[in-house]
Image: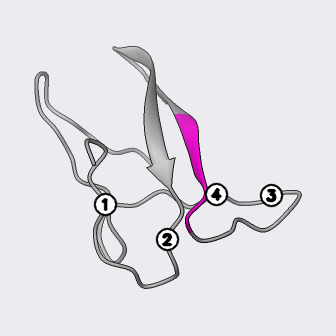
Amino acid sequence: EALEIPAGGTVVLKPGSDHVMLMGLKAPLKKGTRFELSLTFDKSGTVVIPVQVQKAGARSYKATE
């Protein structure tokens, strides 16, 4: 599914709203694990963001945290 972000705009990814689900993983993710995630956009190319795994139903996470 597409997520439209206006030029110069930002978006907060959070449970119950706009979020990213990682499907088909070879191993389960553990709460607290940190890694980098590459998001590919039509116009701005690939952006790498830091991610911290939270428990299901956790509060919002801003990419700048």
Q: Earlier in the sequence, mark 2 or mark 3?
A: 3
Residue underneath mark 4: 22
Circles 4 and 3: CB atoms closer than 8 Å: yes
Residue underneath mark 3: 25
Q: CA distance from mark 2 to mark 1?
A: 9 Å
Residue flagged by tag 3: what amino acid is it?
A: Leu
Residue closer to the observer: 24 or 26:
26
User: Which picture quadrant has residue 26?
Assistant: bottom right
In the structure shown, which secondary structural element does the residue marked by tag 1 occupy?
Answer: loop
The vertical placement of 10 against 42, above or below, is: below
Task: State the residue at coordinates (26%, 40%).
Answer: 4
In the structure shown, which secondary structural element does the residue marked by tag 2 occupy?
Answer: loop
Residue underneath mark 2: 54
Locate residue 7, reporting x and y percent: 13, 22
User: Which picture quadrant has residue 29?
Assistant: bottom right
Q: CA distance from mark 2 to mark 3?
A: 16 Å
**With 46 as the anchor, is 33 left or right in this view?**
right
Q: Residue furthest right?
A: 26
Mark 3: few/some/many CA within 10 Å (<14, 14-19, 20+): few
Mark 2: few/some/many CA within 10 Å (<14, 14-19, 20+): some
Q: Residue furthest bottom?
A: 57
In the structure shown, which secondary structural element does the residue marked by tag 3 occupy?
Answer: loop
**With 28 as the anchor, is 51 left or right in this view?**
left
User: Which picture quadrant has residue 59?
Assistant: bottom left
Using the image, tell me which numbered label, if any, was put on residue 61: 1
Magenta-colored stretch includes residue 46? no
- The residue range painted magenta reads 32-37
Q: Earlier in the sequence, mark 2 or mark 4?
A: 4
Q: Earlier in the sequence, mark 2 or mark 1?
A: 2
Circles 2 and 1: CB atoms closer than 8 Å: yes
Locate residue 54, reporting x and y percent: 49, 71
Circles 2 and 4: CB atoms closer than 8 Å: no
